[in-house]
Image (spheres, rainbow, N blue to C red):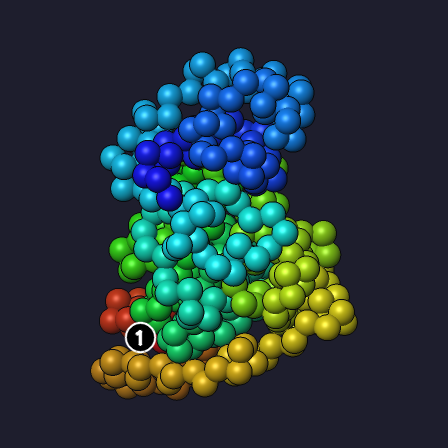
Amino acid sequence: MNEQDRPFWVALTAFRPFGPVRMARLARRFPSMERAFGASALELTEAGIEPEIVSRFLQERIHIDPDALYRELEVRGIRLVTIKDDIYPPLLKQIYDPPAVLFVRGVLPDPNRKHLAVVGSRGASKYGLRVTDELIEPVARAGVVIVSGLAYGIDATAHDAALRAEGTTLAVLGSGVDHESIYPSHNRALASRILASGGALISEFPLHTPPLKQNFPFRNRIIAGLCQGTLVVEAAIKSGSLITARSAMDSNRDVYAVPGPIHSLLSEGPHELIKNGATPVTKPEDIFGIEPMPAPVSAYQPANEEETLVWSRLSRTPLHVDELIRSTQLPAPKLMSTLTLMEMKGGITHEGGQFYTRSR
């Protein structure tokens, strides 16, 4: 593509009503986006743009500076990937309404690698978080690219599991990819870790776009569109995760779902998907039929009798302090000091709420 045309792709995207469908109409009608940006009302109408949208664009166009917008991308190290570029993800191009542009911070992985979307509830249960951790770490270690949305709960856990496996993970945002727009702000540190590990932040929304509620269904179709399969861990029947799963089904991609307790509202989404043909997942091998690589053996070794006793009672299933007191017969102060020391050594993990597990 003509490099001189790139600023005009950015400029047209800065006009919010020019989403993927209207951008596709402009690309078909005009020889360049520069020509589209400077088109007359009649030409835009002939391209299939609605008259009221044309009127708004002509009013706002005079306030849009293509060169300034593009320079900001370059200064911030953000790449503009258009649907006409060779590096545009080929799977994403196959969906019904692929984004005309992607704003990318970081590195897009080899598209020939398997990509797995991982979605679920922001308010996930301990069960959901643990299952996500235990499934995704070996899958990522086997070379699968983990794609999620950087939200609280299942998303953040999936990204973190991929990073701990020294794998590759992509975060698709419902906001701009600039640091100030990343949502939730609590996960900006996680976003920095993703970039440092060789992953990427991706959005179809211009810089400085806030995380508006209406953006997230659009974000979800990109998450599913980038991937050969989508895994749903915990989700209510009416949730963004189910929208993502349906987007995957509509694109003839694999859909996986983790069964959960039948009385949990967060199990309703995965169970409904399984009834409709999704593959139930109870172990990493259920995903793409991969053969997970074994996790590295923990370097931690108990240093004394108390640590040995506590270590023997713990596993990857969270155990409450009260249960540890009963099973080890250690006085509470001694147990707490032992737990603190073991956590400092990296042998155990405090899962919150006085629950502990062995660390990976």
Name the quadrant containing residue 351.
bottom left
- Left or right of 357: which side holds 126? right
Residue density around tag 1, few if under 14, some if 14–19, many if 20 or more, within 10 Å: many
Which quadrant: the C terminus? bottom left
- Figure label count: 1
The residue pinned by badge 1 equals 347
Q: 300 or 59: which is nearer to us?
A: 59
**Amino acid marked by disc 1:** Gly
- Left or right of 346: which side holds 272? right
Q: 312 or 331: which is nearer to us?
A: 312
**Depicted 9 relative to depicted 323: above or below:** above
- Left or right of 104: which side holds 243? right
Name the quadrant containing residue 256.
bottom right
Name the quadrant containing residue 213.
top right
Q: Residue at x 37, y 21 (%)?
A: 65
Residue 22 visible in the snapshot = yes
Residue 102 visible in the snapshot = no
Q: 65 or 307: which is nearer to us?
A: 65
Q: Residue at x 37, y 26 (%)?
A: 66
Q: Position of residue 159 (x, y in %)?
A: 42, 60
- Left or right of 190: which side holds 49? right
Q: Position of residue 317 (x, y in %)?
A: 49, 76
Q: 153 or 288: which is nearer to us?
A: 288
**Depicted 92 relative to depicted 75: above or below:** below
Q: Position of residue 161 (x, y in %)?
A: 41, 66
